[in-house]
Image (cartoon, grey):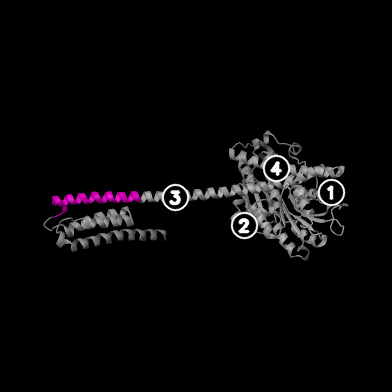
Amino acid sequence: MPNNERLWKEARRYGFAASATLIATWLRLLAAPLLDDRVPFGFFFLSVILTAWRCGTGPAVFAVIFGIALVDVFVIPTHYATIVNSPADSLALLVYAFATLVTIALFERTKNQRRAAEQNAAEIAKLNENLREAAQKKDEFMALLAHELRNPLAPLRSGIELLDRPEIAWRQGEEILNRMRRQMRHLVRIVDDLLDVSRFLQGTLRLNRNVVDLRTIVRDAIEMTQPEIDRQQHELKFLRPPLPIYIYADMVRLVQIVSNLLTNAAKYTPRCGLIVVTLDRNGGQAVLQVADNGIGIANSDRDKIFELFGQASGARVAKEGGLGLGLALVRHLTDMHDGVVEAESDGPGCGATFRIRLPLATPSQLAERVIPDETLVSKTKSSEPEGVASQSLQSQPIPVSGSDGEALRVLIVDDNVDAAETLGTLLSLDGYETQHVFDGVNAIDAVEEFQPAAVLLDLGMPGMDGYEVARRMRQLPEGRQLKIIAVTGWGGEEDRRRSAEAGFDEHFAKPVDPAMIAAFLSDREAVPR
């Protein structure tokens, strides 16, 4: 079919040339009584120009040759055998041929210049679009970075405020320090990821390879990510093969790859989900697979998730957070190990499977050295404390109270357990009765049961985000007079506008000064008593 279309297009081009030449011949014959045998090629020159402009070089050259033949037959006097037998007509032929060929060449050059200009314009437009996208990605990344840094900074700032209080008991101080250590390690991981990306882009990232057992790598990665998996109440299954699977790899970077996959699965799987890790051999490759029953991946997003600063959608970023570095590092580190990473999903809501294929260690590599499990454990074992404190703090006798003399009740809603508990402790010491919940569904239930006067609500929570929680709270009978304050890592003008539209009374960006919250809560005109 394409060949037939091309032939039809060429036939139309050359048909136009022939038609223009025949029309020129007819006009020249009509003008014969006036011109006699003078200017034999005048009309034909016009037909060649029209053909060159309309159909290009090939049809124009055909029009020149066809025109010469028609002039020889119909225009030149019959007592001449051919054009070349007349010196005047021979000169006219040379002038006509030279002029038409120069004209055709000029048309071809103009067409090429126009085509080049159009291509340049298209390339410039594409470059401008790429620059706009890059600028937009940069702005989005900077906003995400600010959000991700503010989240751990909030409990750090609150922890410092608490440790300055003389009434803090020794055991409470230890708990506060543990929270601060966890958030500090989170900050360090963010900085480490940023440095790894910088090293990779600059080509300075190097691997320290040795023979390692992939089973041990997975075990250490699970130990590192177990607190996050437990916090989300996920079930984790590791189908550990009975025999070692040796690969030639950088053990630290490989633990980073697997832990990033596990963190990704925990983050994008609703609470009480299932994560399954499997190891297998396939020919000369080791196959690592991390599967979950989480929110899944749309077909259009499968490539985006492996791009630097790329995530599946804006809503997914807002709800789950993250800089979009984890999976990008997984791909780059896997490539450096001569491996391949793949993502599979049947679509949104159908879970996702990430599969990594790495070459097995060769016999010569195995003969060099095998690192014992104990050595690997000592280098990669996480120092994360077991468990995350999640118990609500007990209310204390307080001077801050409502009109009936009871303590002012404040509900704190934040999926960052450390941030919620540290802020709650500060407010409790200031005399408020506090309760924490860590997701939107429980927050709505707590409004009905706890009957708070104010709610400190995070925006970027998994599942139901803070905007939707605020809207649903406003629909409750208890929510009409309720004061809802956003305490969030999102501090831009657009975020403040959206929170106001959702029904928030105030918007504080993390790390917020506790005195600002206390000042707002102590305002009897702002908070119902």
Residue farthest top in this picture = 368
Q: Position of residue 149 (x, y in %)?
A: 69, 45
Against 157, residue 45 (above or below) is: below
| Residue pointed to by mark 3 | 121
Q: Is residue 338 left or right of residue 462?
A: left
Mark 4 to mark 1 CA distance (whole Å): 32 Å
Q: Position of residue 139 (x, y in %)?
A: 60, 48
Q: Amino acid at mark 2?
A: Ala
Q: Earlier in the sequence, mark 3 or mark 2?
A: 3
Mark 4 to mark 3 CA distance (whole Å): 44 Å
Q: Is residue 76 left or right of residue 7?
A: left
User: Circle 3 — which element?
Assistant: helix
Q: Nearer the viewer, mark 4 or mark 1?
A: 1
> What label does residue 189 carry, if any?
4
Q: Earlier in the sequence, mark 4 or mark 3?
A: 3
Mark 2 to mark 4 CA distance (whole Å): 28 Å
Q: Position of residue 21 (x, y in %)?
A: 25, 59
Mark 3 to mark 2 CA distance (whole Å): 34 Å
At 76% from the left and 65% from the top, the residue drawn is 476
Magenta stretch?
A: 81-110
User: Circle 1 — which element?
Assistant: helix
Against 511, residue 465 (above or below) is: below
User: Circle 4 — which element?
Assistant: helix
Q: Nearer the viewer, residue 357 or 111?
A: 111
Q: Is residue 352 visible?
A: no
| Residue pointed to by mark 2 | 298
Mark 3 packing: few (<14 Cα in 10 Å), some, or many (20+)? Answer: few
Q: Amino acid at mark 1?
A: Leu
Mark 3 to mark 1 CA distance (whole Å): 65 Å
| Residue pointed to by mark 1 | 429
> What label does residue 78 carry, if any?
none
